[in-house]
Amino acid sequence: MLNSDKLDRLLDRFRTIEAELAAGPDPAQHVKLSKEYAELEEIATAARNLRAAEKEAADLQRMLEADDTDPELRALAEMEQAELAERLATLERQVKLLLLPKDAADDRNVILEVRAGTGGDEAALFAGDLFRMYQRYAALKGWTVEIISASEADLGGYKEIIASISGRGVFAELKFESGVHRVQRVPETESQGRIHTSAATVAVLPEAEEVDIDIDEKDLRIDVYRSSGPGGQSVNTTDSAVRITHLPTGIVVTQQDEKSQHKNRAKALKILRARLYDLEREKLDAARSAARKGQVGSGDRSERIRTYNFPQGRVTDHRINLTLYKLDQVIKGDALGELIQALITEHQANLLAEVEADGRSF
């Protein structure tokens, strides 16, 4: 059930922020208040709509209970009351969803890692398709994509590509993309026209700050070596490549895309910090796993989450049993948002059911 006092306090705070912003606070305070205003605006608007509907319902009830209400007016009020009851239920659910506990990492930028899995050259080509899908989706959302490292395959695509994506609410939208993505199609190299099944693994890690993960230098083994592959003569003749091993966890990160050893080291540490932060989050999630069984998948990157079937032009997300017959639009990024929003909606519904089953108030 909704905690009416909590909702009133939230609206009071929002009104206070509106007044203070209108009064023109000093620049430092303005930034702080604007951030809080943006965080509260959606829930405050929903709460105001709910309060207005509740007042309307109370007014109708008084009209129906009054002895002197005209019969014709009473009949109209009864019809309106039934419609209002449905609207109230919808508004209350909306407010409850907005009051659900937020994932602390939802507003983080992300480290996106796409790796070719089973399927050889075709898997690498598919990994390239997936990465471009996320690139296109990021562009549509106004996010910024920066490639950190890439290992290209002989026939195109990527054996592995790692990028950072920055913008508003990136992790909140992309976090359910982690897992094994499977493709079924006829490879360009297939002369018999047979359908092959290949896979690529996607990892979406919330970007960590130094304050989140304190890395002790004593826990690191840092090796430098000569870069290989594309990059030009100056890259290949200097020990600019960096391999960092985090000894307590065994996590290894290599970086060789930059000509500068210092830049490669910084990029490798950025990836390592994100992986360690993700590891800590997974430990916390495991501790709460009994309460999260109904959630949208586990995010486990060994789990097959989605199949892209080219001959039938369909994409199926196995976690929510959703199939879209618009593969072309999805793989171009244009319709990826439909899948993402369906996953978010399912996740929120499960969280809501969990809270209500426990008898907790919002």
Image: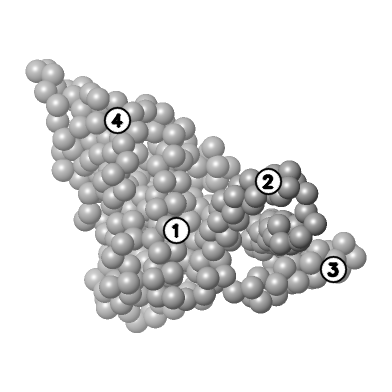
Residue 285 in the figure: left or right of residue 24: left
Quote the CA–CA distance across marks 1 and 4: 25 Å
Mark 3 or 2, nearer chain start:
3
Q: Amino acid at mark 2?
A: Ala
Residue at which label 3 appears: 20
Kind of residue at badge 1: Gln
Which residue is identified by label 2? Answer: 75
Q: Earlier in the sequence, mark 1 or mark 2?
A: 2
- Secondary structure at badge 2 equals helix
Q: Residue at x 58, y 42 (%)?
A: 142
The residue beneath circle 1 is: 348
- Front residue (pair 86, 295): 86
Circles 4 and 3 in contact, beta carbons < 8 Å: no
Crowdedness near tag 4: few (<14), some (14–19) or many (≥20) residues, C-alpha within 10 Å = some
Q: Position of residue 57 (x, y in %)?
A: 68, 58
Residues under labels 4 and 3: Cα distance? 52 Å
Q: Name the N-terminal-most of marks 4 and 3.
A: 3
Kind of residue sitting beneath label 4: Arg
* Residue 354 seen in this snapshot: yes
> Can residue 245 be seen?
no
Quarter of the image with the C terminus is bottom right
Choose between 148 and 193: the one closer to the eye: 193
Question: Image point 70% across, 75% down: which residue?
Answer: 9
Residue 314's label in the rendered image is 4
User: How far apart are the two marked residues, 4 and 2, measured between alpha carbons?
Assistant: 50 Å
Q: Nearer the viewer, mark 4 or mark 2?
A: 2
Residue 118 position by quadrant: top left
Query: Compared with residue 190, is residue 270 higher up or lower down, i.e. above or below?
Result: below
Assess disc 3: are there few (<14), some (14-19) or many (≥20) residues with their C-alpha within 10 Å of its C-alpha: some
The image position of residue 271, as x and y in percent, is 39, 61
Task: Indicate the secondary structure of the residue bearing disc 3.
Answer: helix
